[in-house]
Image: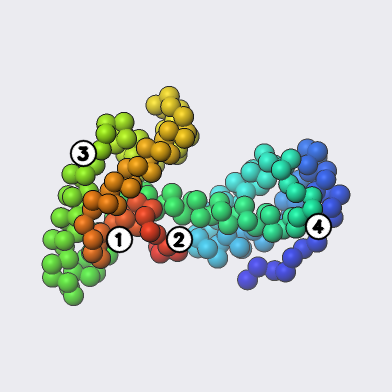
């Protein structure tokens, strides 16, 4: 459980806003372990939790001028940690290993659902067929993100387009797939892997 709020001296926050590295180190030493425990409660893996904590402090430093001196600093910091954790979970859900996880689920459930394996294969094939119907650039962007694991920014740089354009392509692709992929238990699981209607803790 996360410990109660820690009162950090307002002068430390003010110094951080001005770019004082020593003051920032005070914040790091004060909150590093507590943030780690907080994130670990959500994501359950220490390696990911450590990565998130480092990213949180990096974001904090890069956006230090945006720190509201009138707000509760700890609430602000833990909000960043929560949002960063959820973003990583969504990224993990798009990776191929979670598609493999769905396949393993199929093996478990097929005993009680004799037609489950056939249904899963049909849905997988349907997904591939639908991907072929996407506009070429939209499909390219979607696959770079989903199968190669590139971030929106990396895709934007690779294809020499804006990050907003990447976001629009992926959003439209997901909307098309959600609309046209058949319903049912396994289609729902498949869409968890595509970020659609997913619960952040489903695989955690």
Q: Which mark is residue 27?
A: none
Disc 4/disc 1 C-alpha distance (Å): 44 Å
Which circle's residue, 2 or 1, is located before the other in the chain? 1
Depth check: give the residue in front, 151 or 72.
Answer: 72
Residue at x-position 16% and y-position 56%: 121
| Residue 91 visible at all | yes
Q: Which mark is residue 132?
A: 3
- Where is residue 13 shown, x and y percent of the image? 80, 48
| Comparing labels 3 and 4, the label whose residue is closer to the camera | 3
| Residue 104 visible at all | no
Q: Which residue is mark 2?
A: 200
**In the rendered view, does 199 fall on the left or right side of 81?**
left
Q: Which residue is mark 1?
A: 189
Disc 3/disc 1 C-alpha distance (Å): 21 Å
Q: Estimate how packed mark 4 is, as few (under 14), some (14 to 19) or many (20 or more) residues with alpha carbons within 10 Å.
A: some
- Where is residue 57 shown, x and y percent of the image? 66, 47
Q: Secondary structure at mark 1?
A: helix
| Comparing labels 3 and 2, the label whose residue is closer to the camera | 3
Which circle's residue, 2 or 4, is located before the other in the chain? 4
């Amino acid at each position: 459980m996360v410990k109660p709020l820690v009162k950090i001296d307002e002068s430390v926050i003010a110094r951080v806003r001005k770019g004082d590295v020593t003051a920032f180190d005070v914040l790091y030493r004060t909150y590093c372990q507590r943030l780690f425990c907080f994130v670990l409660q959500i994501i359950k893996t220490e390696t990911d939790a450590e990565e998130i904590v480092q990213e949180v402090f990096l974001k904090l430093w890069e956006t230090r001028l945006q720190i509201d001196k009138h707000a509760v600093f700890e609430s602000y910091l833990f909000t960043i940690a929560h949002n960063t954790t959820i973003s990583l979970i969504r990224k993990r859900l798009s990776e191929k290993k979670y598609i493999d996880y769905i396949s393993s689920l199929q093996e478990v459930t097929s005993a009680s659902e004799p037609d489950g394996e056939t249904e899963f294969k049909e849905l997988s094939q349907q997904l591939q067929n639908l991907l072929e119907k996407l506009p070429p650039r939209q499909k390219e962007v979607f696959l770079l993100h989903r199968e190669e694991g590139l971030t929106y920014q990396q895709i934007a740089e690779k294809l020499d387009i804006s990050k907003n354009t990447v976001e629009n392509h992926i959003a439209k692709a997901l909307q098309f797939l959600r609309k046209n992929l058949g319903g049912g238990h396994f289609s729902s699981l498949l869409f968890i892997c595509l970020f659609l209607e997913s619960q952040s803790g489903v695989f955690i």
